Amino acid sequence: METATISFDIETSDATCPFSVEILLDNTVLLKTDHVQQKIAFSHAMNDDDIEHELRVVILGKTSEHTRIDQAGNIIKDATLQISNVVIDDIEINQLFLEKCVYKHNFNGTQSDIEDTFHGVAGCNGTISFQFSTPIYLWLLENM
């Protein structure tokens, strides 16, 4: 059976923030880490069969202490996670990934739950969801 490989990097802006990350594909945990301290180079080969998929990156561990705000209410320092270098079968899809992702969060418990766009940087605990289908080349042709 043919396979397709998806890969990307996850990096933190502040290694002291105890971000934990879970990466799931179709509700199966592929990676779980309790504290992102250095770049994670994630890669996973999946069957390239005829199916719908959901890739989720779940982020936890950030608190209000990880964000510094000045007297005017401006963020002067913040702990974030960045997702970059998104590749499927040696094809860079960063822009497509950002266009298709949904970022569900609640501003770390300070507001109601929202579904937001994702721009490559996550500053709140929440879930980044990316839906795609295989065979991957057909999905790429339909979406690029």
Image: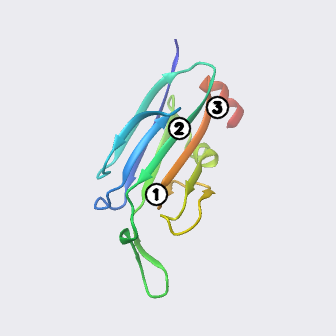
- 136 in relation to 40, above or below: above
Q: Which residue is mark 1?
A: 125
Q: Residue at x 50, y 34 (%)?
A: 27
| Local secondary structure at mark 1 | loop
For the residues labelled 1 and 3, the Cα–Cα distance comes to: 29 Å
Q: Is residue 26 left or right of residue 141?
A: left
Q: Are marks 1 and 2 in contact (CB under 8 Å)?
A: no
Q: In which quadrant is the C terminus drawn?
A: top right
Q: Give the crowd class for mark 1: few <14, some 14-19, many >=20 residues within 10 Å.
A: many
Residue at (47, 44) in percent of width and height: 85
Q: Which residue is mark 2?
A: 55
* Residue at numbered disc 3: 140
Query: Where residue 126 appears, x then y in whole percent?
Result: 50, 54
> What is the quadrant of residue 14 in the picture?
bottom left
Question: Circle 3 — which element?
Answer: helix
From the viewer's side, name the closer residue of 136 and 114. Answer: 114
Q: Amino acid at mark 2?
A: Leu
